[in-house]
Amino acid sequence: MSQMPQQAAVSKCPSCEEPLESGDRFCGACGYDLSAVPARPQDSPTLAMNGSVPAPGSPPDGVDWPVAPGAESSGRPAPVHLPTDLPGTDSGGSALPPEAPHVPQQPPLPPEAPHVPQQPPLPPEPPLPPQPPAADVPAAGVRFDRRQEPDEYPLQAPDPRLAADPAVPAPPAPAADGKVCVACRAGRVDDDGYCENCGHAQPRERDHMEQESGPVAAVSDRGLRHHRNEDAFSVGHTALPDGTRAAVAIVCDGVSSATRPDDASLAASRAAGECLLAALPRGTHPQQAMHDAIVAASQAVNALAEEPATAREHAPHQNAPACTLVGAVVTAGLLVVGWVGDSRVYWVPVDRSAPPARLTEDDSWAAQMVAAGLMSEAEAYADERAHAITGWLGADAYELEPHTASFKPDRPGVVVVCTDGLWNYAESAEEMAEAVPHDAAARPLHSARVLVGHALDGGGHDNVTVAVLPFPAPPQGAGSA
């Protein structure tokens, strides 16, 4: 608690501020009774704004301050002058120049309100300010009519002279697993595919995929409108029991309205491809092997819906994972196709004077309308419901109905296995034949790239996946150029 020195005598009238002579009992100007001014107590603590005792070193109360109302009662009368009667001073106690603006004064509290002694004074020579700066002299009490002040004040920037060698932020640590951001080339890529340094989304592995296996090749692309690629494929080749070659291609399209369609298409394509490549060398008929492969793919997709709840907690109200499937097996003299859904297989002969053909029928609303004779094919596929599928792989499918068919082409050609991301831009067999390069049988990978480019040039509204297989399958040791 700070102690303030006792005032020796009253030098000015508390009412009108006129100077007093030693021994005066009444003010000669206003007649104020000076005996009513009580003597200053021996110990008079000064309260700070928060009600606490001021810190040591506060300026002493060396002069009389005009009496003003306050939050506590001390028995002193309220002043008769107005705050605007007192001139302001600067921070050094000197009078302000005439052109300097005055600080707005605070309105006085009602006269009947209790009051307390004012804060420690400035030197007696300068005129008395109406209110000392809060930073220099603590207030006599809490004022509820004070202007609002910010809760926080900006910190002053550090003096650069004090930090001659400022610390330079260390560059991000290189990725330990080798995955470096393609944008900043410094940050590590997290498990969600984003850079931990700059936040840039990284290209996903499935955004664009290409694979060539012997005489068969496939390409898959995310397209220009989708945020991820929900298609998947599987290609391979094997030898039949008689030593001749067989090429296999499976293409799957995830159902976007289902949960985890990308997982469904990937699981289905892998299961079907592995089943075919395992069954054909054992002598299983290619058409039966295709049927079994579709069943295996269906079981793989169904298993995704049986995973623990933690795998589906982010989408609990969506239906089970689902996808469509289409595949082809090409041997030396036999072409087998199988499908569930609306992905397709096209036959394009090397001799373009021969007619091309579509080898599958869609499991879709449009196909049902055409089969029932209710609409023409052009009318049905122009309807907004055309691509609503009636068959798919998934735990919520009504009933699994694998479709298979066998063909024995009488001339060489290529087999195009694709999702609707391609055939939307080349729907008829003739349109598909026009898009297929003439050297497709010799360059299947190049042709698959060209067909994906055809879809992207057309708008790329969907994921695009296509596999190209030459017919007949070339003998062992031969492949694409």
Image: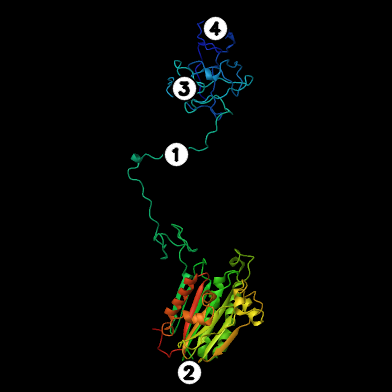
Q: Residue under circle 1? A: 155
Question: Quick one: SS at disc 3?
Answer: loop
Few, some or many residues within 10 Å of mark 4 (<14, 14–19, 20+): few
Q: Earlier in the sequence, mark 3 or mark 1?
A: 3
Q: Position of residue 99 (x, y in %)?
A: 43, 23
Please, which residue is most extreme toward the left here? 164
Question: Quick one: SS at disc 2?
Answer: loop
Label number found at residue 59: 3
Q: Residue under circle 2? A: 242
Q: Nearer the viewer, mark 3 or mark 4?
A: 4
| Cα–Cα gap, marks 4 and 1 | 52 Å
Mark 4 residue type = Ala
Q: Nearer the viewer, mark 3 or mark 1?
A: 1
Q: Which corner quadrant of the image does residue 188 belong to? A: bottom left
| Cα–Cα gap, marks 3 and 2 | 111 Å
Kindly identify the residue that appears in the image at 35 percent across and 46 percent down: 166
- Residue 107 appears left or right of 177: right
**Considering only vertical position in the picture, is 14 above or below 181?**
above
Label number found at residue 379: none
Q: Position of residue 374 (x, y in %)?
A: 67, 79
Q: Position of residue 245 (x, y in %)?
A: 46, 90
